[in-house]
Every structure is written in C-alpha cells, then in structure tokens.
Image: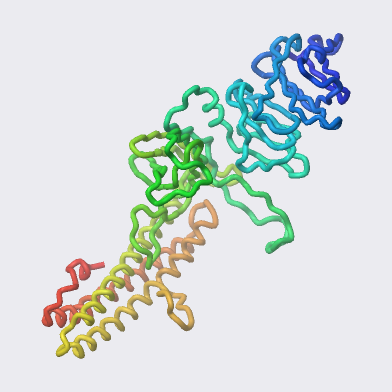
Amino acid sequence: MPDLLWVGTDDGRLHVTRDGGRTWTSVEDNVPDLARGAWVPHIHPSSHDAACAFVVFDDHRRANWTPYVYETRDYGETWKSLATPDVDGYCLSIVQDPVQPRLLFLGTEFGLFVSFDRGRSWRKWTHGVPTVGVRDLAIHPRDHDLVVATHGRSLFIIDDIRPLRHHAAEDEPELLYVLAPLPARTWRMGRPRSSRFPGQGEFRGVNRPYGAIVTVWAGDESLPRHGDEADEEAPKLVATVARGDDVIRRLEQPARFGFNRIVWDLRSRGARSPGSKPDPSADVVGDLVLPGEYRLTVRLGERERSVPVTVLEDAREAVSLDDRRANHELLLAIHELQESLTRAVDRVRDVRADIAAAVDRAPEEVQDDLATKAREARDALDAAEKLLWQPPGEKGIRRSGNVQTLLGRARRGLTSHFGRPTEAQARRVEHARRRLRTALDRLNAVLETEVAAMRDAAREAGIVLFPPRQFEKL
C-alpha cells in the first residue's frame, strides 16, 4: 500500500497513516506491557500483509534493559509480544523475510537472533556475528543475503539465507536435504589499487568463498555438533561434481548436525604431482571449468541428494566460448602430460625401492656384485629422473629445463587469461611434450639396460622383486 506509513519517535510515540499522511492514528497505547516513553528505534512493515508490522522499543536510557518486540496484524489496533526468555538484551532492529513469513531476524544490544516460527521462539546467531549491538538489518532481494549493521563493529553479511527459509517452512526437516546454489560466476581478482605488498598496513575484509556455495542440512541427531572434534570414523559428507556422465571433482568434509556448507571452487580434478602418493580420494585441485550446467551430488551414509549448478562466465571478459574452450583444451593437454610425468616418477620410485630391497636381501657371496649393479642402476635412474623433474633434496643450481618446469611455465601462461592460446603458448606446450618424450625414452632405455641387469643378477641370487609392470614402456 503506497499510502501506508509508520512513524516512531524517540519519546515513545507510534503513529500509522493509511492515506498518505493526511490523517494519523496514534497506536502506542495499544501496545501491552510497554514502558511508556520508550524509544522506537525500528519499525518493519510486513511485505506479506499490509495490516502487519513489527516494532521494537528501547528503554535502556532509563536503566530498563527489558526486550520489547511486538507484532500487529490489524494496523496497530492490537499487538502481540514476541519477546521470549531466549532474547538477550534490549531490542534495536527487526526484519521479516520477504519470501518466508515465519522467518524473522532480531537485533539486540547483545547480538543477532533468528526465529523460524514467527517469533514464538528465538535462537542466538553465533556463527560469524559477534556479541555486539545490531542496529539495523536488511535482506538483499537479488542475492538473498542478510546484511547486519552493528554499532562499532562494521557490517556483516550472511550469505544466502535461502536454506533458513527452507528450514522455517518445514515443521520436521528431512534428515538430509541439499539446496541448489545460486549461479556461480568465474572471475579473476586483480591487484589492489594500493601498494602491492601492504603487510599489516591496510585492512581487507574477508570475502565469501569463491565458487558455488552449496548448503546441506543434516538432521541426524547422532552427528557431531559444530565446534566439536570429529574422529576419523565420524560420518563424512561426500560431494561429487559431474558434467553429463563425467565426474570431474570429488569433495569430502566432516558432517555436522544442522547446516553444513560445501564450497566447490569451480575447478576440476587436477593431475597428481610427481612424488605424491597415489590416493583416489585425495582432492587434487585442477583448472577452472568452462561455463555451463553441472550436477553436484551429496552423499551422507546411504542417503543421497543431487542439485544442479550453473557456472557463468566472467561478465567483464570479452572472450567467446570457443576461445575459452580452446584455452581449456590446451590445459587438458598439459594435464595429460603431467599425468604421464607423474607415472614415470612413480616408476622410478618403485624401481629404486626394489633395488634397495634386493641389496638388503642378497646372500653375502653376491653382495658385492649386486651392490655394483645397484649403484650403476641408481646412477642411471638419477640421471633420467632429473630430466623429468627436480627431485626433493637435490642440492646445487636448480635445473630449469626439466619437464616439470616446462609444464609449469606453460600452464601459468594459459591460466593468466581466459582467451584463445597464442601461438607462442601452443609452441611452449608442444616443446614440453617433446621434452617429456625424450625423458621417457631415456628412462625406458635405463629400465631395459642397467635396471634389467640388476633384475637378472638378483634373480640369479634367488631374489624376485621386480614385477613385469616395472618394465612396461612408458
């Protein structure tokens, strides 16, 4: 109603007009159990019902810290108190969710409170918002964020309150439900306008996590609570991201009773680094995915729920999808080369371990001969490995021409922009491919000669350690 206006004053007066201000009605005397003359710091007209409004009163200036919060559903003729023993501190602000009328937020001198049943009960919000005076509240209509304005502690933003709406609508929430995230946008962060290395010289607030923020409700009362320590056997939330039938990412985190948030950073699974242990469950972070439609599936025990995820492009980038796809495909080529490199380093590690074991098990009469062949094999393996990457612990000047370094340079160039790869970038990847082939051929030759000689000598001594897979062509 455009002609409906509410006015509250700092001397306890509360008026309403329904004709655009031509006439006013004083309604403060209709409010029960109210200290007369208490300030009116906030009035919130309901967006669901024109006759409904929420009002808070503040009388702390007269040493009265009683919380006063009321609702009317008949333009102020009658009022109902929403203050319960759960509310701590005198009240300063209130807002009703514009989508779910049962969801209310209340600001007091001692923090933020939330109600899922239209004020019959309240819970203090303790995650991310300190115990501080909450002077104003607003809900962003597009992003569904709750903006919390405090006295002396700046602003706080609670990202995406849609899960709270869902919770307020359910008298008995499901044991597991997952809310589809808002569309997630890929973007790149530029350098700040100030100094590049500010140290402690400037303040930067904490941004929301990058990517798709997925909210999961876990209603099993046996789960650990937030803030509790969880042992290795505690239940896990396992999320997989897929495009079509292709699973591109797996995320895992401890499950907690209540709301959990899983953040997919819009990256696919990356290639394992050389020297790392193979672990199918490890979250190896790869490159940003292309804009498009994906599906995220969350599993907790035997229960499973799936939601769609939309990934949008950076609106500031004037790059066609074809150009971005070309960039992505060249990054996938680097990914495959990295996988080949890692498998080769794994082979070197396994063969080296078998060489050491063979020497340890050798009978005394052949130890010297085996030790000589082992040294020759290890020296040859070391030389071949250094063509692949920089082994840990190597001293001296770093070799910049190994395959791992070349792949890293090529990848950094491509990930610095979303556009079509330049000719120089494509040549850099091809150069790394050729160097990898040369290094693999060198390693194959070592396996066929020095390592094969070590294997044969070990077998003659009755030691069988080298499986055939270690001699397969790389």
**Residue 3 visible to the viewer:** no
> What residue do we see at 74% from left, 38% from top?
133
**Residue 471 visible to the viewer:** yes
User: Residue 398: image x %, image y %?
Assistant: 47, 78
Quarter of the view holding residue 186: top right
User: Residue 24: image x %, image y %?
Assistant: 85, 11
> What residue do we see at 85% from left, 19% from top?
13
> What residue do we see at 32% from left, 73% from top?
438
User: Where is 471 relative to 144, above or below?
Assistant: below
**Foreground of the two, 249 or 387:** 249
Q: What quarter of the picture does the C terminus occupy?
A: bottom left
User: Residue 460: image x %, image y %?
Assistant: 11, 81
Quarter of the view holding residue 99: top right
Quarter of the view holding residue 235: top left
Find the residue positioned furthest to the right.
11
> What residue do we see at 61% from left, 52% from top?
189
Residue 12 horizontal side relative to residue 49, left or right = right
Q: What quarter of the picture does the N terminus occupy?
A: top right
Residue 22 horizontal side relative to residue 404, left or right = right
Residue 59 horizontal side relative to residue 97, left or right = right
User: Where is 358 relative to 146, above or below?
Assistant: below
**Coloring scheme used:** rainbow
Count of picture labels: 0
